[in-house]
Structure formats: structure tokens, C-alpha cells
Image: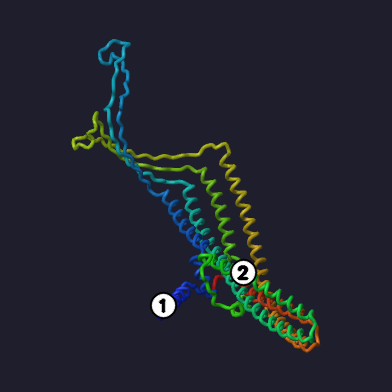
Amino acid sequence: MKNKLILIFSLLVSITVVSQENKQRFSLKEAIIFALENNRTSKNAQRDIEAAKQQKWETTATGLPQIDASIGYQNFLKQQVSLIPAEFFGGNPGEFSEVTFGTKQSVNAVATLNQKIFDGSYLVGLQAAKVFLEISKNAKVKTDLGVRKSVINAYGNVLLAEQSILILERNKAVLKNNLNDLTKIYENGLEEEESVEQLQITLSGVESALKNTLRLKTLAYQMLNITLGLDVYNNTVVTDSLENLSLKNMSLDLIESDANVENTVDYLIAENNKKSKELLLKLEKSKALPTLNTFVNGGYQGYDDSFNFTSKNQKWFGSSLFGVSMDIPVFSSLGRSAATQRAKINLAKSEDDFIETEQRLKLQIASSKSDYQFAIEDYDNKKQNLNLAERIEQKNQIKFFEGIVSSFDLRQAQIQLYSSQQEFLQAMLDVINKKAELETVLNTINN
């Protein structure tokens, strides 16, 4: 029996150790770093950069020497017959002789080297591939900024749920004690039943809020896991606290700093879009230019009436050819002109979009700074309100048990306290989220 108890205890300890090892603990900074490496959207953005690099080389390679080779084998199951005037062979005029030319079987092998000498669209293509790579890199930066902001929001929601549960559980415990005390007083005939019912209503509301917050906590952790790039049911633990993070994220320097719109990723993306439209216009214009290409090839042919091409006595006949070709666009029924005009229109649209983006970013930065400053100010205000609400609730609780105020007054003070608690939690979260939003607009990714 003793050995069985030891075995069971050992199993329980091992299970506890394994469950502890499976937990992944993250501070907010660690969560951001982890997400930038493992978030699925971020990984795909990195893959887009790698694909853009390959596309750049693919475009470059089209202007470099291209070598093609071919091997062919022919076997005439029935050779073609040609008719030749019989008089060529001493026959009668007007008559024809049936002649078969060539051998029944043949093999040929040819290698061709092609090289572009001039092609305007190729030059534009090289520039476009470079711009496309820049677009992919800027898209990765924007993706990382979005992932960082999502991690901060998800992490903050987890902390909000955790802190809300602690406060609600504390409120529930206080209300239960008050209700027990009040019930005893009521049973002794020193208090009205209505007072007990008022506390029961308040306790019921707190218990309902607690159950809902426990469900929201589970969802908040699952959202954080998805944002981090983990399995939705991963056992994740957060190590930062909501209040400490909110205090760390209060920085007036960020509000007072000069914002350079040209450094924001949205500005760079709009600039890339304008460049791409400029290149499309150049591409349409380049189609009116001639293209110049050259080639050289060489090959061998073998002929026989039977398949003896592997024999060392087989005769092979070599040939080689060099050539240059120029294609000159002459007339396209104004098709190229229409395409060029369409490209000009799209360029004009992108230039207006670029100016619009620049102005919108200036407004967005100013708005984000204002929201962040308000969040800091609101934090101080909500903290003061919470302190006042706590004192008011404590005073009303003392007065109630002394018979000075009614149960209705006590309930109003309690509701005011609970509301102030949630408002203060939200104010702390707003400081964190509004700073993250401002940093995203300013293209600041420092953790």
C-alpha cells in the first residue's frame, strides 16, 4: 500500500512539472518579439520579400544570354515521292519519273544562343522589379507595425480581464460578508427586509459580471495566442501587470516630438505606388521603340536508311548560323497611343493620391497625439475618481450599519465604486493602446 501511494504521488508530481513546462510566459516586450518571428501574417510578408527578390532576378535574367538545345529524330514510315520530268534522265518529254529524295531516317542536334541587344521594355522591367522589391519591404514594415499593435491590444485585453476578475472577486467577497452581517441583523429584527434584498441585487450583478469576465478572459487568451502565432489553446502566461505597463507607456516626449511624414510607412507606400505608375507610363512609351536581338546556333545532322546513329562509322554533318533581327513598330491603329494616354491618366491619379495620403497622415498624426495625450490625462482623472468613489463607498457602508443612510444610498455608492473601478482599468488600457496607435502611425517600432 505504501509503495502504491509513493507511485501515485510521483505521477502527480511529474504531471504537475510537465504542465508547468508546457506554459509559455511572456512579458509584453517578449510577446512582440515572438510575434514578429512567428505570427503567420508577418511570416508571409517576409516570404513576399523573398519572392520579390526572386522575381527581380527572373526579370534580370531575361536580358542575359539564353541557351536552348534540341535533339530530334525522324523516321519516314513512307517517304514522300517527287515527280521530275523524265527527259532529265533521257526519257520522253511530257513524262515524269518518280523519285524519292533523302534517307529514311535522320537525327539532328542543335544549340542556340539568344541575346537581347536593345529592348526598352526590358530596361523598364528592371526598374519595376526594383520598385516591386521596395514595395514588398515596405509592406513587411507595415505588417510588422500592425502585428505589434495587435499584440499590444491582445496582451492588454488579457491583463484587463485578469485585473477585472481580481476586482470583481474582491467586491464579491466584501458583498458576501456585508450580506451575512446584514442578514443576522435582519433576523434579529433590527433591519428591514428591503435592505437585505438591495444587497442581494448588488451581489447578483457582481456575480453575473464575474462569470462573463471569466468567459472573456478565455477568449482574450485565445486571441493573444492567435496573434502570437501559437495554437489557439496554447497555455500562455502573461508576466506584466496592467498598471505597471500603463505607467511605463506614459511619455510626453512622444507627443512633443516633431513628426516627419516622409518617414512613415504609408507615405513610402504611396510613393512606391506613384513610382510604379511612372514606370507603367515609361513601359507604354518604350513599346514604340525598336527591339534588337541576335542569335548564333550550331548543330549536327546524321542520315541513314536504318538506325545506325550509335555506330562510330556514322557520318555527322555540322552547320552553324549567326543572325541579327530588328523589330520596328510601325502602325498600331493608335492602340499604343491609347495605352500611353491611359498610363498618363493613372499617373495623374496616383499623384493626387500621394498628396491626399500626405495630408491625411499629417491629420492622423495630430489626431493620434491628441488621443494619446487625452488618455494620459484621463488616467489621472479616473484614478482620482476611483479614490473618491472608494472613500464614498466606505463612508456609506459605515453610515448604513450605523443606521444613518438607507440601503438604497449604499447600493448607489457601491455601483458608483464598481463603475469607477472599470473606468480606471479602461483608462490604463487606453494609455497603452493609444501609445501603440501613435507609434504605429509614426512608424516607431521600439518596444
> Crowdedness of circle 2 by 10 Å Cα count: few (<14), some, many (20+)?
few
- Outermost residue, left direction? 313
Q: Quadrant of residue 220?
A: bottom right
| Picture layout, residue 149 above or below residue 44 | below
Residue shown at the point (47%, 48%) measured from the top left: 122
Q: Nearer the viewer, mark 1 or mark 2?
A: 1
- Outermost residue, front direction? 1
Q: Quadrant of residue 439?
A: bottom right
Q: Are marks 1 and 2 in contact (CB under 8 Å)?
A: no
Q: Is residue 144 visible?
A: no
Assign the N terminus to one quadrant of the image: bottom left
The location of residue 83, given as percent across then percent down, is: 32, 18
Question: Label 2 is placed on what type of residue?
Answer: Arg
Depth check: 188 or 216 in front? 188
Helix, strand or loop under label 1 = helix
* Alpha carbons under labels 1 and 2: distance apart: 39 Å
Question: What's the mark number on residue 4?
Answer: 1
Residue shown at the point (66%, 63%) measured from the top left: 360
Describe residue 166's horizontal placement relative to residue 296 as left or right. right
Depth check: 234 or 318 in front? 234
Describe residue 420's horizontal placement relative to residue 329 as left or right. right
Depth check: 309 or 83 in front? 309
- N-terminal label among 1 and 2: 1
Assign the C terminus to one quadrant of the image: bottom right
Q: Which residue matches tag 2?
A: 215
The location of residue 141, given as percent across then percent down, is: 53, 64
Q: Is residue 231 visible?
A: yes
Question: Label 1 is placed on what type of residue?
Answer: Lys
| Picture layout, residue 77 above or below residue 170 | above
Question: What's the mark number on residue 46?
Answer: none
